[in-house]
Amino acid sequence: MFLKIFYWLPEHGYKKLHGLAWWLVAWSRKSVPYTDRISANTLTGLRVLAGLTLWWLLVLTDWREYLIQIILINVIAFLTDLFDGAVARATGSSSRLGAWLDNIADKLLVLPNLWIVYCLAPMQFLLLGLGPWFIKTGLLLLFIVIIDFLLILLRGYAAWRHVHVEANYFGKVKVFFQCLGIISAQLIVLDHAFPMFLGLHFLIVSLVFSFGSLLVHIWTNLYRFISLKV
């Protein structure tokens, strides 16, 4: 029983678990009915659907009326992002399609959420008598979008040259703080006394790790790009 908790069953090759996400995935697939039928791409697909739902709420509705629902969508999307990679690696189903869908899901979720954070920023700044909010918050979110766009270009170029770019530690930590920052910043709608600056500080940390992820990608893959024939 001890081995079954920390290792997959024989059909999964007895892959050793690493981290809380792997342990929870292993436990749920052995103990909770039907969870063994949920694939990594299914979880990623749920995040894509969540991102499209956010775009629909942002463009076609008054999203301020649905902010609590938006926060719940973000929490669910964050949890699926936590487990889809663990499921893919533990079941040996990692693929370039899954990695591509994971990247698309991230962008579909982040962009509308950053706009919502920007629109909510004046509420906290005005309550505290601070400013100019549009410059401080705008520059922070703009830098986040620019670095994400550069990462998309890098991954796109790598795919065009048939070079597989692996996710790195900085990118994983960046996503964690980005999700934490977005949800924390949006919680101001539930309580105006909630410190939105906590969320903005999380986003600043995510920006640092995002920049680190970009540098690591460039450093680890530059020689591979240079060695390719133009």
Image: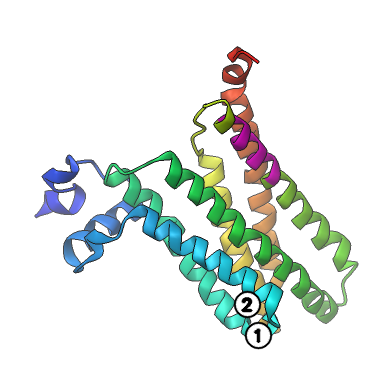
Residue depicted at x 22% and y 59%: 36
Q: Position of residue 195 (x, y in %)?
A: 69, 74
Picture quadrant of residue 171: top right
Residue depicted at x 35% and y 50%: 86
The image's colour scheme reads rainbow
- SS under mark 2: helix
Residue depicted at x 60% and y 39%: 213
Q: Position of residue 228 (x, y in %)?
A: 59, 15
Which numbered tag is attached to residue 187?
2
Q: How would you rate the neighbour count of disc 2 (Cα within 10 Å): few for under 14, some for 14-19, many for 20 or more? A: some
Relative to 194, is 6 on the left or the right?
left
Q: Where is residue 94 in the image (x, y as percent from the top left)?
A: 36, 42
Q: Position of residue 167 (x, y in %)?
A: 50, 39
Name the residue type under label 1.
Answer: Asp
> Tags 1 and 2 in contact by the CB under 8 Å rule?
yes
Above/below status of 57 relative to 12: below
The boundaries of the magenta stretch are 149-158
Name the residue type under label 2.
Answer: Leu
Relative to 163, is 1 on the left or the right?
left
- Foreground of the two, 193 or 171: 171
Q: How would you rate the neighbour count of disc 1 (Cα within 10 Å): few for under 14, some for 14-19, many for 20 or more? A: few
- SS under mark 1: loop
Q: In which quarter of the image is the C terminus?
A: top right
Which numbered tag is attached to residue 191?
1
Per the picture, the main secondary structure of the magenta-coloured stretch is helix
Above/below status of 97 relative to 230: below
Residue furthest to the right? 132
